[in-house]
Image (spheres, rainbow, N blue to C red):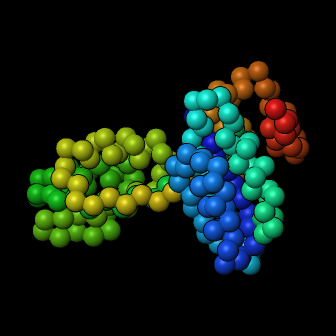
Amino acid sequence: MERTISVLIEKDTGGLARIISILTRRRFHLKSITMSSCERKGYERLTIVLINQSDGVDSGMQLTKQIRKLINVVNVKDITYLPLVERELVLIKLQVSLIERAEISNLAQIFRFKITDITDSTIILEVTADQGKIAALQKILEKYNILELSRSGRIALIRESGVSTSSLKEYPEFELLTGQNYLNNIEDLFKKNY
């Protein structure tokens, strides 16, 4: 199972290196790490996606505790089960014929991706979506000749509008409380130290 960790750090030349050092020393199974500027000047946000090993150890909790100890870390949170908006960016270059180009143009309407470059024999697609939609599109595009594919890491923000379906699947007994403080109640589920 994948765990998503959100980290807010002060901009520092060695900040990312210290986090990568923890990931390598502790041998976490990393799927993606994305770092970018954020809403606060002088700070950066990291989204780390890692895979829990089958040995029963909670990698998300371990990593959260380790990162929290670092000097330049302002906030770290395991946001896996919180209601999220998650996206990835994929650029795909395909070798296509005229007929295939028309087929892909039709797919663009269904999957809502952009065609960013087109020549007589190639086409470049820009897809911004959640990982499920990207996986479905990659499956469909397997029949075409994929020349190059580049995929960014996952980015995520906590959804303020309510509980997502994935949260309800994981915690079906949890009832959504109405009012402004519902997010605090959801976060209380994840503050336990096991």
Q: Residue at x 82, y 32 (%)?
A: 194
Answer whether residue 131 is visible to the viewer in this image. Answer: yes
Q: Position of residue 29 (x, y in %)?
A: 55, 45
Could you say which is closer to the camera, residue 15 or residue 11?
15
Q: Residue at x 64, y 61 (%)?
A: 21
Q: Position of residue 15 (x, y in %)?
A: 69, 70
Q: Position of residue 17 (x, y in %)?
A: 63, 68
Number of numbered discs overlaid on the protein picture = 0
Toward the top, the furthest residue is: 173
Q: Residue at x 28, y 42 (%)?
A: 140
Looking at the image, is 4 positioned above or below residue 153?
above
Looking at the image, is 145 positioned above or below residue 8?
above
Could you say which is closer to the camera, residue 162 or residue 5?
5
In the picture, residue 47 is in which quadrant? bottom right
Looking at the image, is 123 positioned above or below residue 100?
below
Q: Please state if 31 lies on the left or on the right of 84 as rendered.
A: left
Answer whether residue 178 is visible to the viewer in this image. Answer: no
Toward the front, the furthest residue is: 25
Looking at the image, is 52 positioned above or below residue 155?
above
Q: Please state if 7 lies on the left or on the right of 149 as rendered.
A: right
Q: Please state if 76 lies on the left or on the right of 136 as rendered.
A: right
Q: Quadrant of the N terminus?
A: top right
In the picture, residue 11 is in which quadrant? bottom right
Q: Position of residue 143 (x, y in %)?
A: 19, 44
Could you say which is closer to the camera, residue 104 or residue 169?
169
